[in-house]
Every structure is written in structure tokens, then in C-alpha cells.
Image (tube, grey):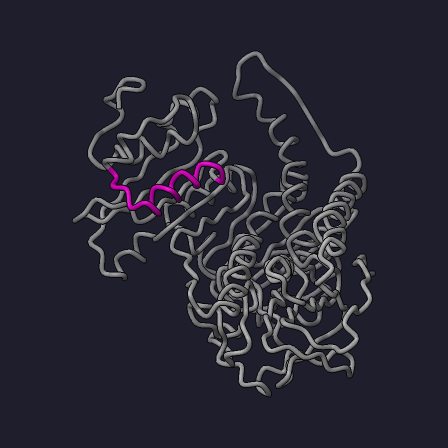
Amino acid sequence: MSYCYAKQNSNPSNQYDLIVIGAGSGGFSAAITAAERGKNVLLVGYGTIGGTCVNVGCVPSKTLIRAVEIVHTAADTRRFDGISSHANIVDWQAVIKQKQQLVDSLRQAKYSDILPQYPNITYLEGNASLTQVGIEVEGKIFEASKTIIATGSSNATPPIKGLQNIDYLDSTRLLEIDQLPSSLLVIGAGVIGCELAQLFSRAGVQVSICCRSRLLPEEEPEISATLEKIFQKENITVYKGINYKEIKQNANGYELLFNNINETVCIEKVLVCTGRKPNIDSLNCDAVGVKLNSKGGVEVNQYLASSNPNIYAVGDVTGRDMFVYMAAYSAKLAVNNLLDGDTMAYDATVMPSVTFVDPQIAHVGMTEQQAQQAGFETKISVLPVAQIPRAIAARNTEGVIKLVADKKTDILLGAHICATEAGDSIQTAVLAIKNKMTSRDFGNTIFPYLTMVEGLKLAAQTFDKDIRKLSCCAG
């Protein structure tokens, strides 16, 4: 079912200044940016308007994460003497219904209702393919001198024997189920897999998660190890370093067999979330000279231009930095570059990333390994959250903070946090790294006491001091 705003083609000549393919965050950002500069834009969507984030990604998953967090927090009051509480899920269908109401309202308010406010944006729904003069949609040609591809990404399927023969779930379907299964196997331990594993575990499902390497393999090893301990404490079974043999159906559900360990996992439902792939299949890239990169996405230069100088690409379809805010950011750059000449380079140096497990995980800048590969002689600071006064007072001391700095200049290169509300704290590190602060200057900056963000100050001081020898606020 489509919920999009249906706007008639207001340009009978079918000629536009710019065509944008894709009506998600990147597509809307591009169309609005161009419209605000007075350009006549054709925005082409396919499927439900709004793209992944609002419909099947960020919004539905994060509201459900918050919902089950209440259940977990209520049970966790035992860490305080003299306090007892309890919460439980009494109607999962009601939880899903409320989630969908939120999705529908945000889609309407932030996508469908926006279109009428821009008379120079024409919205068209259909499957678009690239041509030498613009695009073709259902046999009709629409012309423009420039085109932006913003078609996003979709769930990728791993090459596991037997997977094609079973009715497995992807993240989209899992967030729609109105009956909780008794057990769930999560194949893939990236951001999506880890978030959904903890979500459904806290909803009362017996969860196992398996991966070829480790939890969140792009994070620092200290962060991954901390999350693994947290998962184990919450009775989530973790299988890491797995070599998959076969998955098949049995009388009670499904069973997954491994090549490298003598164990079989039997479960009721299977979730596959082993990454995402750029949506390029119907674009006809070869016909217009648009090259693809090693990740199967549209290859672009630093200005977001493809190998065809009249076609730019933004967001997930490029196969990199698959975050909704990076799609919007790159879309604005692409529009300004194609209108003004290539003057604004794409820069993800201080791109923050947040994983909404609990405690949250966030990072910005380089890992220790990345910094060394870039030629830096590094020094690191690792601070257990148990040494942060706010965490001690809240009796919630799980987590770790790791900072990476250039040993020669003391300039901060990366910040990695596993702590309560890390997603809010990370922006302080973003500004510090963006402004090339040294760890000494960062550690000497005034932070408010009894806040989690103070942990960054303490981590910076840990490069040179043993903060256990300091009194409160002595740093």
C-alpha cells in the first residue's frame, strides 16, 4: 500500500532542471535543496514514500527499543536497596499498533505533507531507469540536464546453504510481527542485528546471535567485548567466529549447523541481518556509463559525481556511510555541486555513529587500528564507565570509553563510547576532533559534574593520570 501524496505532473513538457530518483531522506533533501534555489524538480519515488528510516528502520526500531527498555529498567531497580518494581508486556499487538501509528504520522508530516509546500517539485511514483536525456518511468521519458540517484539500500542475503528454502525474517518483517516467538536466532551482529537481538530479548524472547567475527566488528575490540558481556548477562547467547554449514527446517522451527563448532542451534524464528546492498538493479547504470564500486554501489568522487558527469549519487546507493543523516548531508552537497560547479567535497571525517543497544555505543573518528594504518603513532586511553561519578551514583557502571590520539601532537583522532546515552555524549567528541583539540586541552576543559559526558574529560585525563587518585572534580 502506498501512502504518498499524489501530485499530478505540473510540467506537461516533461522537462526539468533536475531529476531526483528516490523519495527517502536523501531524495527529499536533494529535491528541497534544489527547489529552494528556484529549480524545477521531478522527484520520483518507488514504493512507500519516505524511504527506509521512517518506515522500516530508525523510527520503528527505536520506538520499540524504548518500549522494552521500560520493562528492563523496571526489573533492574534491584540495584537500589529498598526499591522493587515490575513491568511486563501485556499486549504486544498494541505495542506494534502504536509503533505503526507513529510511523504513519511521521511519514505524513515529514514527507507527504511537505510536497505541497514546494510548487516547483513534481512528485511521480514509478520504477525509474536512467537514459541519456534523463529517466524513463513506465515507458515515458522525462528529461533533465542533471540527475541525482538516491535509491537507498535493501537487506542483503548471505550465502548460507538452505537459507533460500526457509521462511526467514528480515528486519522489516520482524518489526511488523504481532506475536512474539518463543525463540529467535539473529544471523549477523552488526548494528541492526545487535539492536534487534537485545530488543526482542528484553521483550521476553530467548535470543541467540551468531556472526562470522565478533559483535559490532567495526567497533573497537574493547567495545565489542563489553557488549558481549552485557548480552551474556541478559541471557543472549553469542556465537562468534562462526563458519555456517547449513540451515534447515525441523518439526519445531529451524536449526542452524556450523562447520567449526560441534553445536546446532534450534529456534522458532530466524532473523537475517547481514548487511545491506545498494538499490541499483533497475537503474540501467551500464547504459549511461555509470560505474559501480566494489560494494555494488554507484561509484562517486569527492563531490558526489558519478563516472557520468551529469549524474550524481547520494546516500546508501553509494555503498558507504549508510546513515540517514549522511544521505541528507550528501544530497545537499550534490545539489550545490551540480548547480555551482564542484566546490563542496564530501567529508565524513567527523561523522558520528550510534548503535542503540543499552548501554548505547557511539564513535567518531578513527579506531586505533585505522589511525595506525593511516601512519599515525598512536596512544590510547581506556576508561571503564565504573570510574565515572554519574555512573557510580546511578549504580549503572557497565561500559567503557576509549580515546585515540596522535602520540606526537597529542591531537585527538577518535572517540569510542559504550555508556548510557553515548549517542548524546559523542557530539562533544565530534566538536573536539573537528577542532583538532589535544587530549590535554580536552581534559582541561570544564565539564559539568555528575554527567555521563564528563566521562570524556576523565578519559582524556587518563592519558597522563591515574584518575583514581583524584578527588571529585579535582581534574
Position of 166 compared to 475: left or right?
right
Q: In the image as oriented, which residue stretches furthest toward the top? A: 82
| Quadrant in which the N terminus appears | bottom right
x and y, in percent, of residue 235 in the image: 56, 40
* Vertical comparison of 472 with 44: above or below: above
Position of 121 compared to 431: left or right?
right
**Is residue 267 found inside the magenta-colored segment of the image?**
no
| Quadrant in which the C terminus appears | top left
| Quadrant in the rendering for residue 263 | bottom right
Q: Which is nearer the eye, 44 or 17?
A: 17
Q: In the image as oriented, which residue stretches furthest toward the bottom? A: 287
**Could one spot residue 261 in this view of the protein?**
no
x and y, in percent, of residue 3 in the image: 81, 57
x and y, in percent, of residue 122 in the image: 74, 65
| Quadrant in the rendering for residue 270 | bottom right
Position of 244 compared to 154: left or right?
left
State the residue at coordinates (31%, 39%).
Answer: 382
Q: In the image as oriented, which residue stretches furthest toward the left? A: 408
Position of 292 compared to 88: left or right?
left
**Could one spot residue 115 in this view of the protein?**
yes
| Quadrant in the rendering for residue 102 | top right
State the residue at coordinates (46%, 75%).
Answer: 294
Q: Give the range drawn in magenta.
A: 423-439
**Is residue 434 found inside the magenta-colored segment of the image?**
yes
State the residue at coordinates (27%, 61%).
Answer: 374
Secondary structure mainly formed by the magenta segment: helix
x and y, in percent, of residue 236 in the image: 56, 44
